[in-house]
Amino acid sequence: MHGIVLSERHLKRILRQLGLFRRNRFVNFEEILLFIHNELQGSAKLNGYRLMHLKCIQNGFSVSREMVREIIRALDPEGVELRRRRTLVRRRYYSKGPNCIWYMDSYDKLKP
């Protein structure tokens, strides 16, 4: 169509030079374990394995969803059980008084 002829070997060489790979290069298991452990210590305690998998990919890790699911199951069995039963614990908010806390999305978290 464009008159450009590339051999398969040349194409693979170009892709390797550009750093373009399929997601078959998985990173070290300990690095992923440490990253997920740190994420679970923060505000990602209620996140499921799909969102955690997305966070891993966004941070440059190439990992399968199954591996993320197994790691979360090992590190946080209580959270997995709560998400499975869909009975998450509601957070508690404390305010100094009326009109002390305002939210940009106008959702009043104190009301429930």
Image: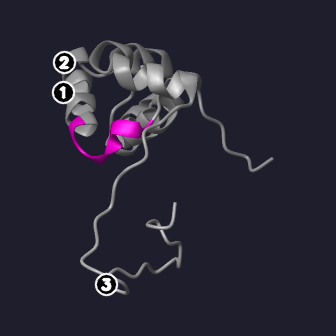
The reply to whether the C-beta atoms of the residues labelled 3 and 1 are less than 8 Å apart is no
**Which amino acid, mark 2?**
Glu
Along the line of sight, which residue is nearer the eye, 29 or 34?
34
* Cα distance in 3D space between marks 2 and 1: 6 Å
- Residue 71: image x %, image y %? 34, 17
Residue kind at label 1, given as amino acid type: Leu
The magenta-colored residue range is 41-47
Name the chief secondary structure element in magenta. helix
| Residue at (29, 81) in percent of width and height | 97
The residue that mark 2 highlights is: 30
Crowding at mark 1 (Cα within 10 Å: few <14, some 14-19, many 20+) = few
| Disc 2/disc 3 C-alpha distance (Å) | 44 Å
Label placed on residue 34 = 1
Is 57 drawn above or below residue 97 in the view shown?
A: above
C-alpha span from label 3 to label 1: 38 Å
Q: Secondary structure at mark 3?
A: loop
Residue 100 painted magenta? no
